[in-house]
Amino acid sequence: MTASPSNAPLRSAKPAGAWLAAVSCLSLVGMAGALAATAQAQSAPAAASAPIYNETPPGAKPRVVVTTDPELDDSNSLLRYLLYTPDFRTEGLIYASSQFHWKGDGKGTTLSVPGREYTKGGKDLCPCTSWRWAPGDRFIDADLDVYAKAYANLRVHNHAYPTPQALRSVVRWGNVDFDGEMDHDTPGSDLIKQLLLDKDEAPIYLHAWGGQSTIARALKSIEDTYKDTPQWAAIRAKVVRKAIINPSGDQDDTYAKYIKPHWGDIRYMEQRGGISLSYLSLITASKEDAAFLTAEWTKANISSKGPMGAHYRVWGDGKQMAPGDMFDYFGIAGKSAKQLKAEGYHVWSPVFAPGSFISEGDTPTFLNLIDNGLAGYRPASFGGWGGVLFHNTETFQLDPGMMQAVAAMNENPSAPVTIKRAPTSLFMAAAQNDFAARMKWAVTPQYRGANHAPSVTLAGPALRKVHAGQLVTLSARTADPDGNMVKLRWWPYAEAGTYAGAVTLDKAQGPSARLRVPADARPGQTIHIVAEATDNGTPAMTHYARVVLEVQ
């Protein structure tokens, strides 16, 4: 489950240092390690040496571990993740717990943690032996079951899709007994420990869609094993340079209580400003973006597309992750919020039309890893479909004013209630159309029966040294595997760069673009220009290239 139901655009804090000197080659890949290392050097105390951080080698796929709890939005996020597995080295799919879902130890042990959802509303529903975890739940395996049914078709469109057997071989059970339990090793924590200590120096992206207790247990096991040995300094440095935590908030407090105090120099990559896929996105996203979440769009492009589409959770689908779960009212059709509350459900969002998008709150954690040309995961400031880094490890909280408006909407649906919508995303249309195209792959056994993304190739280096006031001309060529027409447009990606002023392109369409570097740009500042290639297939698909201008 995601602990951050909103993706409000926020700029990341980024150094403006002269990291260019450390770059050994003029490419986005080569620039990645230099920017990350320089950022750490500038933010670290003067008396301490900056940690060394490894980056995914050029041409290699990111190594990924997903830890996830049994929330419906996690299942939806996992379905989307599976459609992008050709872009990753999936090293682990691990069952995890959180404050919202924990399995219990099967021995009758009870738990109640102050301030959790079961303590709110004037009555405490715990101590409990488990919380919102269905007996026998195997939600990861269930997602893999439907992936297996689509695999033959998917492989027609991309031969790199891993076999269902390969993905099943990395499924593990992590620390699921209780909220924040990290007292003992589990197959899931053992797998993470093994990956962090193996000989492959490529970093491990540790996705925490639920709580972080399984990740914390792996780190604690490493600490317990090596702390009092001569190898400790080397082992600790190895873990720090390889581990990257991509969280959906700190959902069980194990980051705050253990990981941050003991492993605070591990990269912790929270993102904001990506595409909006939260529980409230239908009313908080712009109207243009929300059009990709309606019942009509979702049915036409996602939920009607074979076994994977049928497994995707939508409003009013008649399903519950755990039978009798009074916090999961999303599958109930034909009842208002007031009626659901009268029946004892804990209703905190509007009730949307049957068939509408519910949530994929954890999807933004992996969107920047997708091989769409943006290389959004490499240096700390780049960004992409998943947004840019937000340097804050506190759990994001919903705006109280918005929640009051939602409550008023539920009380009287006909009353005029205004909820401020976010600006239209730079990436929502492209990301959702790409998702829809891959869902079509899942039900299309011939390559020519579906659309595939175009390519865009820059003429010249991706990283360029420029001067204030300089006129810069950029060019690129495109190609399409289906023979479709491709439209190329260029635009400045302000959130990813460090120059804070406006950048205007006086030529922004076609194979070339032109801009003048602003006169007030200062040495060390960066300007990111995106080349966006979109074909005219159905659904339309988009690929990108990025030029980074470094002011001298």
Image (cartoon, rainbow, N blue to C red):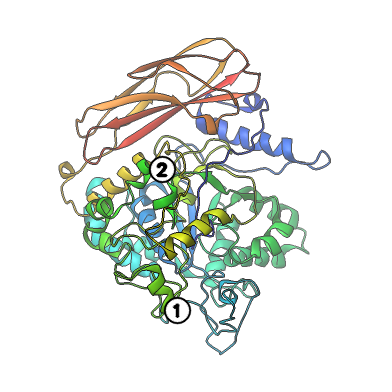
CA–CA distance between discs 1 and 2?
32 Å
Residue, x 57% and y 52% (percent of image)? 199
x then y, percent, for residue 351:
37, 63
The reply to whether the C-beta atoms of the residues labelled 1 and 2 are less than 8 Å apart is no
x then y, percent, for residue 156:
22, 48
Horizontal placement of 267 versus 294: left or right? right
Given residues 119 and 243, the one toward you in this image is 119
Residue 41: which quarter of the image? Answer: top right
Horizontal placement of 412 versus 31: left or right? left
Horizontal placement of 63 versus 466: left or right? left
Query: Where 152 sits versus 464, above or below?
Result: below
The quarter in which the C terminus is drawn is top right
Residue, x 32% and y 19% (percent of image)? 510
Q: Amino acid at mark 1?
A: Gly
Residue, x 32% and y 61% (percent of image)? 312
List the single residue furthest toward the front. Answer: 415
Q: Amino acid at mark 2?
A: Ser
Q: Which mark is residue 286?
A: 2
Query: Where 31 sits versus 301, above or below?
Result: above
The residue beneath circle 1 is: 344
Q: Which secondary structure, mark 1?
A: loop
Q: Which secondary structure, mark 2?
A: loop
Q: Is residue 198 visible?
A: no
